[in-house]
């Protein structure tokens, strides 16, 4: 990428394609994914996730997404957190889905 010579990314086709990609794409060295991440970074300045498109997509994602910095997954986890306080599982959508998933889900 000519205008960002220090930008080291795996797939240059993702750069500036209208979709905010995380990781090395969303860095100053890569122009914040060619400008694709400017709005995301403004809304969630301290949210560093690998897949920013999962924030606010209508599905509660756990881990680094369900944090204050990421707006509790862009609001997707607010109801889950209220209904199941203290419940930390990899896939929140498995909780209350009618299937017994075992492990941390019990």
Image (cartoon, grey):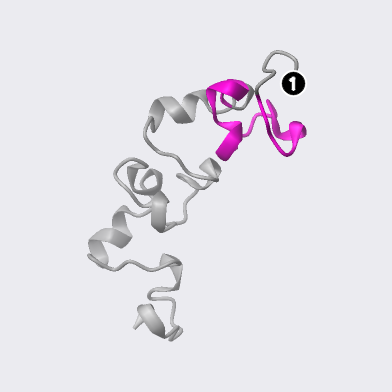
Q: Image point 41% across, 25% down: which residue?
A: 42
Compare residues 53 and 33 and report the one nearer the observer: 33
- Above or below, 15 against 22 in this view is above
Residue 47 covered by magenta stretch = no
Q: Image point 29% across, 68% down: which residue?
A: 87
- Above or below, 96 against 62 in this view is below
Q: Image point 36% across, 52% down: which residue?
A: 66
What is the secondary structure assignment of the residue under circle 1?
loop
Mark 1, Cα crowd under 10 Å, few <14 / some 14-19 / many 20+, is few
Q: Name the residue under label 1.
A: 1
Q: Quadrant of the N terminus?
A: top right
- Above or below, 101 against 79 in this view is below
**Residue 85 placed where, x, y %?**
22, 65
Give the magenta part as a residue range: 7-32
State left or right for residue 3 relative to residue 97: right
Compare residues 71 and 7 and report the one nearer the observer: 7
State left or right for residue 86 relative to residue 42: left
Q: Quadrant of the C terminus?
A: bottom left
**Residue 71 placed where, x, y %?**
34, 42
Q: Image point 75% across, 37% down: which residue?
A: 11
């Amino acid at each position: 990428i000519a205008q960002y010579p220090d930008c080291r990314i795996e797939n240059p086709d993702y750069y500036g394609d209208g979709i905010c990609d995380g990781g090395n794409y969303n860095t100053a060295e890569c122009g914040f994914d060619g400008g694709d991440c400017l709005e995301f970074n403004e809304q969630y300045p301290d949210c560093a996730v690998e897949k920013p498109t999962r924030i606010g997509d209508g599905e509660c994602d756990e881990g680094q997404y369900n944090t204050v910095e990421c707006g509790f997954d862009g609001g997707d986890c607010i109801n889950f957190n209220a209904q199941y306080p203290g419940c930390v599982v990899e896939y929140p959508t498995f909780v209350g889905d009618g299937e017994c998933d075992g492990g941390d889900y019990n």
